[in-house]
Amino acid sequence: MSIRLEELLKDSLSKNFKTNLQLELNPSKYLKEQLVEMMKSWNYKYRGPYAVLEQSNGFGKTKACLGLVDEECYVVYCNLGDKKSMGYPKRSSIADKFIFDWCSESYYNRYFNAFIDLLNTTEISCLDFFEKYNELDGHYSKTVEDLVEYQIRNSEYDRSISFYKGIKPLIFVFDEASYLLKVNDFRGSKTHFDVLRNTLSKLSNNIFVLFVNMFTISSNFNTKRDLDPSARNAYSSLYELEPIYLLPNWDLYADQVKIEKIDDSVKFENICMYGRPLWGSLLQTWLNSGNKYNSLSYKEWNNLALNGLTGGKMTESLNSNDILAVVGCRLGVIQPKSISRRQELVANNMAVCVYVKNSEYLFDIVYPSEPILAEAAAYVMHSIGYDKIVESLIESLKYSLISINDKAGLIAKLILLIAMDKAGKDIRNNMPFLCLNVVQVGFFLQKLYGKCDENCGNETNNWTCSSQNMKCVLKLVNEQLQDPDTLLNGYVNFNHFVQSKRNMSEAPLLPALKRCAAFQCKQNEKSINFVIPVCLNKDNLESISAIMVKVKLNNNPKNLENKSFVEYAFTEMSEDFDPYKGFLVLYMQLGQPKNKTSFISSLKPREDNEFNKYQAIIYSQGISHEMFSILESGLDEKLVTLSQAEESPFSRGEILNKKIYDSIFSL
């Protein structure tokens, strides 16, 4: 990380959060409300006034905590992070002593007392207090260290925790707190957190402690465990407060996106406005700083997204979790079965936690729509090879590390994204991005299914193919649509899929088009699996059509039947979809009978219907390089293997167990 980027991170942190206009909530105000409720209730059945703030990097956790100062809270901030970290805030000067092996409960008592005693005897505003004791610059600030040392020199070793007399909440924030889970060698199997927890139970009256980025705490909450789940909570009548995991700060800057035409949607300054607040906050700070950060390049921003997604790792050093992250932020999350692996994806790979309940061992994650992260994933996919991605998924599925409920959908999305990546990369006019681009529908289809020969259609002749190949995808579209030029000259820009929470009749296409997303339809959607928005006019966003995708995975497909999607298009799509301009359906039957070759054909309905002229249906059967020309270097065979892979309850080498299992479940 360059010095300039580090300075930008610092400047960005000092800016106030925007209010979430949709929810009318400020993240810091929301956080204070949560903490106040916890402070009221902890005394009755919980071990102490403390909780964990669990969420992905770049989500604004630290900023929300520091923003408590503006909500009239006294905030004591301590960063326990890695000494080598180039990020901001810096590791606190007192961090070494806080996680040193000889550190005792007495030291923690004195740390808290240093601030409690100060506020009990000093009139000071929340802002002045924070500015004096914030330690955001790490070892450059010795104020806190001096304050604690004074407490040590002038108090008894076994002094108890002081009673806080203040009316305004006193919030202690420990950032990068996972370091507290390190085993204290001086105290056997106890972690630093185990020792600290004894002190936490003694805090009272308007005091609360927040541990940020402490993802493995769920396995450290109960002081004693039992192999029998029903007995696990029987050892203590006290519980831990459940983690705080949601902050109202997704898409905070989306209202500032200025997209008037399709080319605007792939501009760097627009895609950064979507997703977690890190990107929008950095960009706004940059744009409002005059010429201060002119030396920063877009490439450095791109590298920041890459580092967040894979920790800066590339090629052979990527592990299976890194691969799941790369796939997840483009195709939709693939949930690992292990909670610890889900926590690792949030801690290290930008997954977003959407539900936590430690008492019931629940931890759910997603990768919401975030175009800049999807582009970083596209770069990784291209760099290591799509075949490596598929190999890792096969391995994880084979050894039951993950579950894939919709393999057909996953494979189809991967094929569509590979085609889009290669099309965007070939155009090469959208720096700093490798793949993200605006691509004409005709060119996208040629990338997906291949050009029939050198005489195949192109933009200059309105995608009119003059070859003799009757299975050319352009010919199949041209022969079915009344006005094929409008659709084939339209534009797609998707670089990831997002799960629609509503039926497509209630899901406008324009917002997805603006954020470079395609829809994965709800499971109860009648006919279609995916919808890719198509902009029909490069100068505005007033006319939108779509490429709809139907997916099947049946190795013994029934005889090919002519289909119609007219009713769906005219009755089940959103109001901003214009079916009269023509739409395309890709019917992808990914399975095929043995000894049968892949093929492509139209699926024109036989019955005469005045609306048939508005639809074109391309039917494909099988997964092969001959069918999808982008599936090179054996990638087609690996996708077939993935389509046939089954979960195994056994790890490598458990042959005997497998035989026993098969003998029991062989009926």
Image (cartoon, helix red, strand yellow):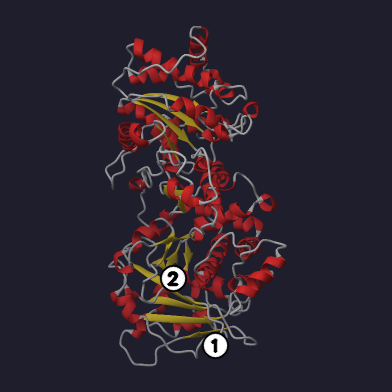
Which is more toward the observer, 140 or 547? 140
Mark before the other along the chain sequence, 2 or 1: 1
The percent position of residue 313, horizontal first and vertical second, equals 64, 47
Query: Which quarter of the figure is the C terminus placed in?
Result: bottom right
Q: Is residue 279 left or right of residue 572?
A: right
Q: Answer whether residue 636 is visible to the viewer in this image.
A: no
Q: Compared with residue 191, is residue 638 higher up or lower down, i.e. above or below? A: below
Which is more toward the observer, 421 or 229? 229
Mark 2 vs mark 1, CA separation in Å: 21 Å
The crowd level at tag 2 (other Cα within 10 Å; few <14, some 14-19, many 20+) is many
Locate residue 279: give its quadrant. top left
Judging from the image, what secondary structure is the residue with disc 2 in? loop
The answer to whether the residues at label 2 and label 1 have Cβ atoms under 8 Å apart is no
What amino acid does circle 1 point to?
Met
- Which residue is at 49% across, 32% downward? 175
Q: Residue furthest bottom?
A: 607
Which is more toward the observer, 656 or 548? 656
Pointer 2 residue? 489
What amino acid does circle 2 point to?
Asn
The percent position of residue 185, horizontal first and vertical second, equals 65, 29
The crowd level at tag 1 (other Cα within 10 Å; few <14, some 14-19, many 20+) is few
Q: What mark, if any, has residue 470 been given in the picture?
A: 1
Query: Which quarter of the figure is the N terminus placed in?
Result: top right
- Which residue is at 52% across, 15% downward? 145
